[in-house]
Amino acid sequence: MIDPRRIRLLNENHDGQGAVIYWMSRDQRVRHNWALLFARRKAELMQEPLVVLFTLAPSFLHAPLRHYGFMLKGLQEVEADLKALNIPFVLLQGEPERELPRFAEQMRAGLLVTDFSPLNISGKWKKEVAQQLTIPLYEVDTHNIVPCWIASGKQEYSARTIRPKINALLGEFLTDFPDLEPLASPSQQQPVDWNNVYRKLKADPDVPSVEWLKPGEQAAQACLDSFLQNRLASYAEQRNDPNAGATSFLSPYLHFGHISAQFIAIRASKSNAPEADKKAFLEELIVRRELAENYCCYNDRYDSLEGIPAWARESLKQHGDDRREYLYSAETFAAAKTHERLWNAAQRELITTGVIHGYMRMYWAKKILEWSETPRQAFETAIFLNDRFALDGREPNGYAGIAWSIGGLHDRPWFDREVYGKIRYMNASGCARKFDVNRYIARFESQEGRKKTEQQTLFP
Ligand SMILES: Cc1cc2nc3c(=O)[nH]c(=O)nc-3n(C[C@H](O)[C@H](O)[C@H](O)COP(=O)(O)OP(=O)(O)OC[C@H]3O[C@@H](n4cnc5c(N)ncnc54)[C@H](O)[C@@H]3O)c2cc1C
């Protein structure tokens, strides 16, 4: 049963007669996908064909080959899995606001369904598509457990304010998924010419694919299984140790929609790991992640200094002229060439593996604030580096994480100090108290160390 509160209509058109198109965008999976389930149900009720469509923009917020490669391999799996269910899959290359209305007309579609993202670019695409269509465009939040617009109708102040709202609704939304029923007859759709898709791609090859994390739904499930079996039971105690490999490594899969947060939450809740570990993990997966979605949904300046709280902006302004002991450009940060081995190791982790451990991510962003000419420059550098190298970048969690580290978002004012103002401070000795920093540095400092880490894979 699909909760109707998960679905909203983005224009005022009524269902027409004709094919149901699911415009798959952010949630690139076949299993546990409310948007696909809704489209399948509509097709059944209307006795119309169902088509899944993906529009591949030639460039998406400057995503490099690392990201396009991960996504396209996942989509190849989507095509194969849909084929097994007799559901046709179409991939169109071009801008969605041009390609979609044209395709809908060509298909004589009766309605369009898409998934939800709070990012501005997605909102712009949907608005333009919705305006051009004469049929409905439904949006289904299949990324969040509690639909973003149901959890709260305004920007939340912090985890403390959104937590009770989400918890009050979890019983209603954290439900099992029905099976996706196959269509009766095999699809006549021509398979996607993937070689041609790769040939036409304009992605930057300077950030290459990573080998240690395989893309796609199956790999995401395997990653979840390995986390539940081997790592969840030590999550509460070890998640802040970057050497322990104790976290889930699920963020790239969540970002590309290869796995559903709701499915992860159900599996984690049912596991026999200690309650404290489950609680700590579900706090991150549900409350913190959905708080980031809330921030981007209700604050369209989420990727700039204008998005941060007024107290933080004011405090950073007051410290704008403070002397910075070290100053680096975005290029020096990108090349991991600062004076500090610990910071450089984190940047190298990002370059080599496409992720930074969560604890080091905070340190990494705060030092960018400390060593940049202005907070604005720091904000831009952090977003640039995160989006360029991180497999889970271009994502509400990234924008909120950077705004938390550099701009006090979802945090409170701390003691006033140089450069940081009232933004919470972090230093290397704090890291040394938490984990073996020399071991971390060694893992990413040398060429051999980096290669070994990548080959061995980061998690057991
Ligand atoms: C400066 C900075 C930048 C960040 N950039 C990103 C990013 O681009 N993409 C991204 O997904 N996360 C980002 N985070 C949040 C967090 O660091 C990562 O989600 C986490 O490290 C991913 O590793 P994991 O999947 O092993 O996490 P786990 O600890 O296993 O957590 C499970 C899931 O919970 C969610 N989660 C965990 N921590 C947070 C958090 N602090 N805020 C919101 N959700 C969280 C993620 O979806 C994660 O996959 C950033 C944090 C900071 C401080």
Image: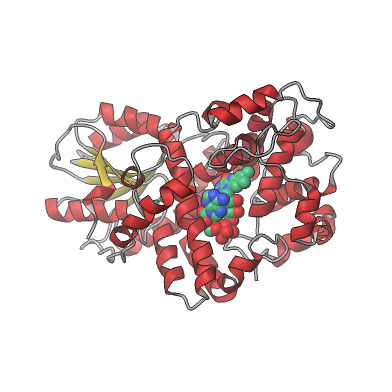
Q: Can residue 430 be seen here?
A: yes
Residue 255, x across and y down, in percent? 50, 50
Q: Which residue occupies the foreground of this view, 319 or 35? A: 319
Quarter in which the C terminus is drawn = bottom right
Residue 130, x across and y down, in percent? 28, 31
Q: Residue furthest bottom?
A: 272
Q: Which residue occupies the foreground of this view, 95 or 258? A: 258
Quarter in which the N terminus is drawn = bottom left
Residue 397, x across and y down, in percent? 53, 45
Position of 271 with respect to 409 (left or right) is left
Name the quadrant containing residue 31. Answer: bottom left
Above-or-below relation of 51 to 96: below
Residue 26, x across and y down, in percent? 42, 46
Q: Can residue 260 be seen here?
A: no
Name the quadrant containing residue 398. Answer: top right
Q: Residue furthest front?
A: 415
Residue drawn at the location 61% of the way across and 37% of the way down:
413
Q: Which residue occupies the foreground of this view, 83 or 239? A: 239
Total numbered labels placed on residues in the image? 0
Image color mode:
secondary structure
Q: Which residue occupies the foreground of this view, 64 or 225? A: 225
Residue drawn at the location 49% of the way across and 28% of the way down:
301
Residue drawn at the location 84% of the way across and 48% of the way down:
341
Position of 285 with respect to 81 (left or right) is right
